Image: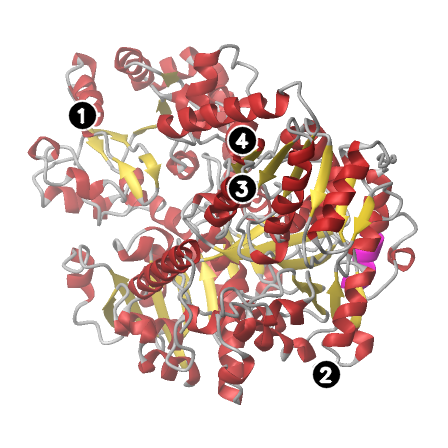
């Protein structure tokens, strides 16, 4: 066995450690139920008729709309043939609700994420949830999924939150899987469902705008009686007394990491209870269900904390006045016509951090920022006439919002929703279908999102496509690695992101994700049942969504290629970024890292309508070498776009630089460093500042010519040839310099080579730069020494910057260099050195390059290969001809 060089062996060790870590995370993220053969059996078995699963807030209790609708259904004789399963978490398992229905012949219970939970979830005919089912859930065609979301949003949601795509990933997946989405009003439909979660064009179900079932309990002679009884059992008497209900929302990092801020809550309630004018009132706290567990064990809350199992709308029904903050609970309360006050001490920071759909000035009640101001507002509201005279504008907004948001909250919402779902009387009610806006729908798998040529090309493409003509969905695997996260943050805001969780479908027939990603096709299941599994996985990710075209833009993973091949799209296209046979055969110290995976991808080409190389030269190469896998007419080409604005401006697209650039309040160094500190540690900032200073000094020196190259430090780029060629120049021109931008497994060896040749002082290794363009533009000549490339985008970027170019001759170089004024040399050190000399002698000069014109031509190619049509047949005007701009 050959001994690997130290740098390569260290690199492979790191890769194995990362592989093992990811495999452990994948296995840990899944319940044993999902990995069991019982789960596979359930997915393959018939759906059990007239069975229902009810879940709210991941089993935190029988709460909200599911609880209200369930009670209506269980008491109605026309639904007595249905059997019901309630999902409860371990904490909610001993709740009064379970005791109430423990002996009911048609009701049973399962624990959240247990084996029985997944089996019921995948075998019951009807599914009701007010939040989300977990990432493993697959909506089966014979099931009916009704999502009864838990409120009209006041706080911004989904993509309306900055960098909100990651947090929205499972919500979007659930919504695309749902047959019905229940909406309290048209504002919620348009702002949240179609807007914040980008469901326009990809949601294939119905939206029911008939109010919320949970508000039905606020009407009628017994309204609030359940809550009064529950409180009486805990020693809190409300009969014959006025009730002030304080119902704030949660704070904190996320819904999954909330902060109760118990001291603040206690101080606010104490200030209200101590006010003489409120001595005859009962002040109660209804905590958001996600923070209730943080408060229940504190004895100071015992006198006023409403139990979590008391439905919020029952508490609203018994209340004479509501005090809240950013909680959408106030929208339900508008239906009562009773007064509402808002206590928002952190309104500035909350609005800026999370964002709100209503400004505090638009709220239907007085607002306060201090407890003293709050108490004064409440005292003014105790008398109804005084309230109306003291707050006339708030009363006017109250009426306007109630008319807009609560028109269907009239006590009959639940019966209407049941009639739509089970009575199939959709035409009688306000049920909306058909959410297409006429744009063509495109879904693109982006690849691994590591910093490389494929990721750069994918991001450029997303910025190029005209969102007025095309609805674009990008999907990729979720990763916590900074490099991948930073690249994901550069996806433009108009693009819908479907982010595939670590909690993946891992079934006995499939094995682990890592095994599959590295498997060749002959090792992948080919039976009918295996094909069904791939259909399951597509449906798990995309639900009912359908597209006009599906693109595997990576083309390097047989696992992901298989998923794209099972897309619900009439046309499927795969990209070929390199001479792929050469890439498959390429050895790195005796190892062929891409062989198994790429040979697997080659055998999947039969499932695609077009194989798209990224240059005409490369198309000829791939067509010749891959012809044995697929017929020749499938081969075609479409060049990659370039991001003109990003190159010229030199922004580089990092999150930190964009943050700083977009914030005009950063007028001094301290503010700038503080802004950068949101994304990087201060040690990292200091290290980077030192590196930038060293680099600026090296490039900015007024000495001789500076050559620059950009690329991964891996064998196919052949930086060693460039370093040796430059050594000849350095011997002749001691003031010449070489800048090498990039990182990779050969970095240590290349640095050692520069030392051994005595030119270490004239060669600068920068590592990976998110903004290489400012460095490139400060250099004099761009050099490339690759053995092979797909389409060398970096050559086009150098041309945008006006740099003269010297490059080795590889299969796809001609089209990139055409009209550049640069020089193509043979692939040996002497020829490359001679090319560098010709630049120094003034024989190579850059010619003007119109990048915008190039992009227009490229996007015509893209439309034709992806949709199988020329741009002219797609419309009179060019659908994708706008100049490429960066909005990352």
Separation of marks 1 and 2 at Cα, in angstroms: 72 Å
Which range is magenta? 859-867
Q: Which residue is identified by label 3?
A: 754
Badge 4: residue crowd in 10 Å (few <14, some 14–19, many ≥20): few
Which tag is nearer the camera, tag 1 or tag 2?
Answer: 2
With 162 as the anchor, is 574 left or right in this view? right
State whether the magenta stretch is mostly helix, strand or loop.
helix
Q: Which residue is identified by label 2?
A: 628
Do residues under tags 4 and 1 come within 8 Å of each other at their CB atoms? no
Q: Position of residue 81 (x, y in %)?
A: 36, 78
Going from N to C along the chain, the mark reached first, 1 or 2, is 1
The answer to whether residue 30 is visible is yes
Residue at the extreme bottom: 527
Q: Which residue is identified by label 1?
A: 263
Asked if residue 522 is positioned above or below residue 193 in the image, the reply reads: below
Residue beneath the point at 34% across and 50% down: 64
Classify mark 2: helix, strand or loop: loop
Which tag is nearer the camera, tag 4 or tag 1?
Answer: 4
Q: Position of residue 527 (x, y in %)?
A: 52, 89
Q: Position of residue 166 (x, y in %)?
A: 47, 47
Going from N to C along the chain, the mark reached first, 4 or 2, is 2
Q: Which residue is identified by label 4?
A: 761
Asked if residue 321 is positioned above or below residue 768 in the image, the reply reads: above
Classify mark 1: helix, strand or loop: helix
């Amino acid at each position: 066995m050959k001994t690997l060089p130290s740098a390569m062996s260290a690199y492979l060790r790191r890769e194995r450690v990362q592989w093992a870590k990811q495999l452990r995370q994948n296995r840990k993220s899944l319940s044993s139920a999902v990995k069991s053969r019982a789960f596979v059996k359930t997915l393959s078995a018939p759906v059990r008729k007239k069975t229902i699963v009810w879940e709210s807030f991941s089993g935190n209790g029988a709460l909200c709309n599911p609880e209200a609708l369930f009670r209506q259904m269980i008491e109605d004789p026309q639904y007595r043939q249905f059997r019901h399963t309630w999902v409860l978490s371990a904490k909610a398992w001993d709740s009064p609700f379970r005791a109430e229905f423990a002996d009911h012949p048609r009701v049973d219970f399962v624990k959240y994420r247990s084996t029985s939970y997944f089996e019921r979830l995948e075998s019951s005919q009807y599914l009701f949830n007010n939040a989300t089912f977990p990432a493993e859930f697959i909506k089966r065609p014979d099931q009916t999924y009704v999502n009864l979301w838990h409120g009209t949003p006041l706080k911004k949601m989904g993509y309306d939150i900055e960098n909100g795509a990651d947090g929205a990933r499972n919500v979007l997946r659930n919504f695309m899987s749902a047959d019905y989405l229940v909406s309290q009003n048209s504002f919620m439909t348009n702002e949240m469902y179609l807007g914040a979660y980008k469901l326009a064009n990809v949601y294939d179900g119905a939206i029911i705008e008939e109010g919320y079932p949970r508000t039905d309990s606020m009407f009628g002679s017994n309204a609030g009686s359940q809550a009064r009884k529950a409180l009486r059992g805990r020693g809190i008497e409300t009969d014959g007394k006025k009730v002030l209900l304080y119902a704030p929302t949660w704070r904190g990092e996320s819904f999954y990491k909330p902060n109760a801020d118990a001291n603040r809550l206690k101080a606010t309630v104490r200030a209200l209870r101590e006010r003489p004018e409120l001595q005859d009132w009962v002040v109660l706290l209804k905590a958001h269900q996600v923070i209730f567990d943080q408060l229940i064990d504190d004895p100071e809350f015992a006198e006023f904390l409403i139990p979590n199992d008391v439905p919020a709308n029952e508490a609203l029904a018994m209340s004479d006045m509501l005090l809240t903050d950013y909680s959408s609970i106030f929208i339900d309360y508008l239906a009562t016509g009773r007064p509402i006050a808002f206590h928002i001490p952190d309104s500035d920071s909350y609005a800026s951090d999370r964002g709100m759909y209503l400004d505090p000035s638009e709220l239907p009640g007085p607002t306060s920022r201090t407890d003293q101001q709050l108490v004064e507002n409440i005292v003014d509201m105790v008398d109804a006439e005084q309230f109306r005279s003291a707050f006339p504008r708030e009363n006017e907004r109250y009426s306007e919002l109630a008319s807009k948001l609560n028109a269907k909250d009239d006590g009959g919402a639940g019966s209407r929703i049941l009639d739509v779902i089970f009575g199939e009387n959709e035409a009688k009610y306000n049920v909306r279908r058909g959410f297409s806006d006429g744009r063509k729908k495109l879904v693109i798998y982006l690849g691994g999102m590591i910093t490389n040529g494929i990721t750069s090309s994918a991001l450029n493409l997303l910025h190029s496509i005209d969102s007025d003509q095309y609805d674009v969905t990008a999907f990729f695997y979720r990763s916590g690695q900074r490099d991948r996260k930073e690249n994901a943050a550069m996806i433009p805001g108009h693009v819908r992101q479907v982010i595939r969780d670590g909690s993946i479908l891992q079934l006995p027939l499939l094995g682990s994700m890592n095994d599959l990603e590295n498997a060749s096709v002959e090792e992948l299941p080919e039976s009918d049942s295996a094909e069904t599994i791939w259909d399951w996985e597509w449906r798990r990710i995309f639900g009912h969504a359908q597209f006009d075209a599906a693109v595997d833009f990576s083309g390097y993973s047989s696992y992901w290629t298989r998923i794209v091949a099972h897309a619900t799209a009439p046309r499927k296209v795969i990209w070929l970024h390199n001479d792929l046979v050469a890439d498959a055969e390429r050895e790195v110290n005796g190892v062929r890292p891409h062989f198994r995976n790429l040979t697997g991808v080659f055998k999947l080409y039969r499932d695609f309508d077009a194989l798209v190389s990224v240059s005409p030269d490369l198309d000829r190469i791939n067509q010749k070498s891959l012809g044995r896998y697929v017929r020749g007419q499938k081969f075609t080409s479409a060049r990659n776009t370039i991001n003109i604005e990003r190159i010229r401006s030199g922004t580089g697209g990092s999150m930190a630089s964009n943050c700083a650039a977009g914030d005009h309040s950063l007028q001094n160094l301290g503010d700038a460093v503080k802004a950068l500190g949101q994304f990087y540690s201060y040690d990292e900032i200091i290290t980077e500042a030192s590196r930038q200073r060293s680099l600026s000094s090296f490039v900015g020196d007024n000495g001789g010519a500076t050559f620059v190259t950009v690329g991964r430090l891996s064998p196919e780029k052949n930086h060693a040839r460039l370093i040796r060629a430059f050594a000849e120049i350095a011997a002749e021109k001691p003031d010449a310099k070489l800048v090498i931008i990039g990182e990779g497994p050969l970095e240590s060896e290349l640095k050692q080579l520069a030392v051994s040749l005595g030119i270490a002082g004239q060669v600068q290794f920068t590592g990976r730069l998110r903004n290489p363009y400012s460095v490139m533009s400060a250099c004099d000549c761009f050099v490339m020494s690759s053995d092979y490339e797909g389409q060398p985008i970096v050559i086009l970027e150098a041309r945008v910057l006006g740099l003269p170019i010297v490059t080795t001759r590889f299969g796809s170089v001609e089209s990139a260099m055409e009209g550049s004024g640069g020089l193509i040399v043979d692939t040996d050190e002497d020829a490359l050195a001679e090319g560098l000399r010709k630049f120094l002698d003034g024989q190579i000069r850059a010619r003007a390059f119109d990048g915008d014109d190039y992009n227009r031509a490229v996007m015509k190619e893209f439309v034709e290969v992806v949709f199988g049509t020329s741009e002219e047949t797609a419309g009179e005007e060019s659908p994708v001809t706008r100049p490429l701009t960066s909005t990352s």
